[in-house]
Image (cartoon, rainbow, N blue to C red):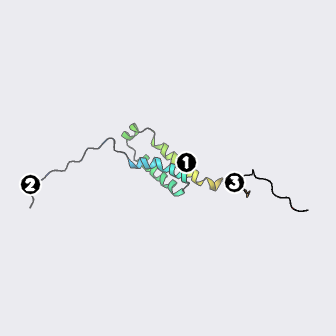
Amino acid sequence: MRRVDLIVPYTEPAKDKSDGDMSNTMATTLPMAAIFTRNKMIGWVAVVFALQSWLAETSEQRKTASTPAYFSVGMSFMSLLVSYMPLFLPPAPVRAVGGSGTEAPGAMPPT
């Protein structure tokens, strides 16, 4: 049996203003990781997180944010562009030159 005089009603804890939003943090850091590693999967995850944080943005977050949420969406699409760039602009072929080009010329073939 429970004692009625020992029951403590539940009170919801107050929200802390400095409580960071992990979704916004992921939306801003994942595009940079995708650009540095040129990993397409990280780029797509960055797009999903950026869209999610943009759609879930509250008016209080809009007032206190240093940059608008659509900037992170643009950054995530730019990370996709960078990771898919080798498909559209292939890198220049590597010349098969031995060394740095400062060595002595090769021997002349016998005539």
Please state the horizontal and vertical placement of residue 21, each as a whole percent of the image: 38, 47
Label 1 sits on what residue type? Met
Q: CA distance from mark 1 to mark 3?
A: 22 Å
Label 2 sits on what residue type? Val
Q: Secondary structure at mark 2?
A: helix
Please state the horizontal and vertical placement of residue 104, each as a whole percent of the image: 78, 53
Q: Which residue is mark 2?
A: 4
* Label 1, residues with CA under 10 Å away: few <14, some 14-19, many ≥20: some
* Label 2, residues with CA under 10 Å away: few <14, some 14-19, many ≥20: few
Q: Is residue 80 rendered to the left or right of residue 12? A: right
Residue at 14%, 51% (x, y): give it.
Answer: 8
Q: Secondary structure at mark 1?
A: helix
Disc marking residue 92: 3
For marks 1 and 2, the one nearer the N-term is 2
Q: Which residue is mark 1?
A: 78
Residue at 47%, 48% (x, y): give it.
Answer: 29
Q: CA distance from mark 1 to mark 2?
A: 61 Å
Q: Which quarter of the rendered picture does the N terminus lie within?
A: bottom left
Label 3 sits on what residue type? Ala
Q: CA distance from mark 3 to mark 2?
A: 79 Å
Q: Is residue 53 rendered to the left or right of residue 11? A: right
For marks 3 and 2, the one nearer the N-term is 2
What is the tally of numbered marks visible in this picture? 3
Disc marking residue 105: none
| Residue nearest the observer in this picture, 37 or 86 | 37
Q: Which quarter of the rendered picture does the C terminus lie within?
A: bottom right
Q: Is residue 28 rendered to the left or right of residue 83? A: left
Residue at 8%, 54% (x, y): give it.
Answer: 4
Work out whether 31 lies above or below 108: above
Work out whether 64 lies above or below 1: above
Please state the horizontal and vertical placement of residue 41, each as a whole percent of the image: 51, 57
Please state the horizontal and vertical placement of residue 102, each as a whole percent of the image: 75, 50
